[in-house]
Image (cartoon, rainbow, N blue to C red):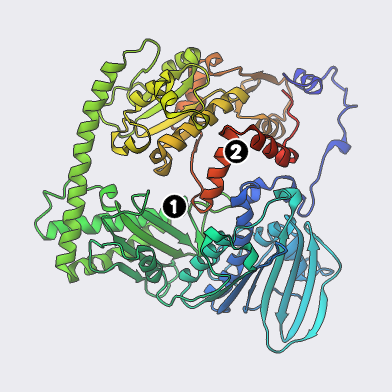
Amino acid sequence: MVSAAKKDLFAGPKSGNDTSNYSAKDIEVLEGLEPVRLRPGMYIGGTDARALHHLFAEVIDNSMDEAVAGHASRIEVEYEISGHLSISDNGRGIPVDPHPKYPKKSALEVILTELHSGGKFSNKAYETSGGLHGVGVSVVNALSDDLVVEVARNKTLYSMTFSRGKPVGKIKNLGAINNRRGTKVRFHPDPEIFGPKAKFSAARLFRMARAKAYLQPGVEIRWKCAPELVQELDAIPSEATFHFPGGLADYLKETMGAKTMITEDIFAGRSKKDTGHGRVEWAVGWTPAGFGEADNLIRSYCNTVPTPGGGTHEAGLRAALTKGLRAYADITGMSKKAANITTDDVMSSIGALVSIFIKSPEFQGQTKDRLSNTEASKLVENAVRDPFDHWLASSPKDATKLLEWAIQNSEDRLKRRKARDVKRKSATKKLRLPGKLSDCSRKGSEGTELFIVEGDSAGGSAKQARNRETQAILPLKGKILNVESATMDKIQRNAEISDLCVALGVGLGKRFELDDLRYERVVIMTDADVDGAHIAALLITFFYRYTPGLIDTGRLYMAMPPLYKLKQGSKIAYAIDDAHKDHLLETEFTGRGKIELGRFKGLGEMMASQLKDTTMNPKTRKMIRITIDDDNLPSTEALVETLMGKRADLRFQYIQDHAQFIEELDI
């Protein structure tokens, strides 16, 4: 349902000159850091634990940029009992002289209070840096209720205090100081943004700080934390010093620990001095034991910024290793056996770290999860390929072992594919459930998807909209069982869960085998409403508890069907929620003419062509990959138990604690 005010808007003006309800006073202009406080998700990805720790990343990245540029050799991190976090370095210090564009303000104040300000837009102050848009430390300032910056420059100490993005007084000259230089930022996250109980995880801060030291061999990072803030399970010291002259090689050796290696040594190196295109450092090792629940461990960085989503630099590393091993097979006369080797065969059970430094990195999103520079792929491939060829040639025994291991991976993969094809056919024969599974026609699992939809009506639309070769549809009857509060016997007797497991080809819990999965991806596709969200939560809980390998390997997704259709003349657009709808109305539908607004009651109400174009076609759809925050796994477990478990009192308390984040919905 649309509110009365919005109904009038969509119906068009009552007369050609009726503008009494819309004037200049209705035009809002957000100044300074107001946009950050109003929409923090646009700048740090949300207000959850990951976003909270992103504040730390933004500040320490500035200090790391000083270290990478050769101006700082030491960074200090301190987590105080008050909840304040401070990061200091012995670099050049933020400039404090008046800014040419704002002569009444110091450069320090401009950097802390103006978006898109800083010294990293050109290559004059920093040849490479992790900061691109000049928003990092100003965003931290906007989202902190207390932030103090101290700058030691030219043997003089300066200080300035801020609160929620605004200065608390002018910059202060604290007098002469001879034994200190650099910048110190001490801040406290604003409880109005992150919630009254939000606090940093000491263990997570510790790991983030230590990882930075590996990325710049010359830097020393000192860690200090109030002992009361270190949890017993964290197993981290309250004080430590990180300094790793070997860089990523040291990191990988520590990560590998006592694991058995396929080769005698790890393959590690650095490109020669940057010639203008960038520089690369890498460390690679293979172990048949794998890495716990994960088959491999691949971590990448750009200008010391972690890129958990990977990107073009990871693609370059994969290409170099795969091509290098294939070339070695040609040289040794094993090319016939190695003909079927793929990148996945080479990257199986691998520990791979790659770090690049380039002048103008392009990330997807402000949180910098994925690198998208096309030239980064070729940069890494060229830097790694020749050293890898020499490394293989210098140790024929190790090289042959590695090649034979990759060939075995290839043969095992082909056997599993053949077995899955047989299971696909047998499972299809066994199901034969009217109105249930509509399987895809492709024999192998590669490129296939299973869409789980709610009800036969939605299933009917999805069957018409799908690609019959690669997309299968499984309609479920209403809400599935909440497995978090059910016994195993009840779960095994549940018809919907049984159908789902048979369609997937997998067992539950310890009997789950990823190799048995009949589809490459599993997509939850529910209505874009509260009931749909509830069903999706129940399904995600089931997969989290009984088929965790689906999530660990990135194979579980959420479809994003639209909630609204907007039409103005021949112009049509779809909005996934109210915020998206409002954004489209403000930016795309600004011309004359009546705006028609339709709200979909469910997937079954959508025409097959609409469902295909908006939700199912890989070229035009948007999907969300379901992941688990490995650094915050204990709280993830607790959250699932709280929201989905048997204890209603825990749910009630959670709602009470988070009620401030609930917005009034116009439905």
Res 310 label: 1
Quadrant in the picture for the C terminus: top right
- 429 vs 361, left or right, is left
* Residue 621, visible in the rendered structure: no
Label 1 element class:
loop
**Residue found at the far top of this picture:** 434
Q: Residue at x 76, y 49 (%)?
A: 192
Depth check: 261 or 247 in front? 261
* Residue 489, visible in the rendered structure: yes
Q: Say which residue label 2 marks.
A: 642
Q: Residue at x 69, y 38 (%)?
A: 653
- 490 vs 2, left or right, is left
Measured Cα–Cα span from mark 2 to mark 1: 32 Å
Where is residue 23? Give x, y as percent. Answer: 87, 33
Where is residue 272? Give x, y as percent. Answer: 37, 74
- 230 vs 292, left or right, is right
Q: Is residue 185 above or below residue 318?
A: below
Label 2 element class:
helix
Depth check: 400 or 660 in front? 660
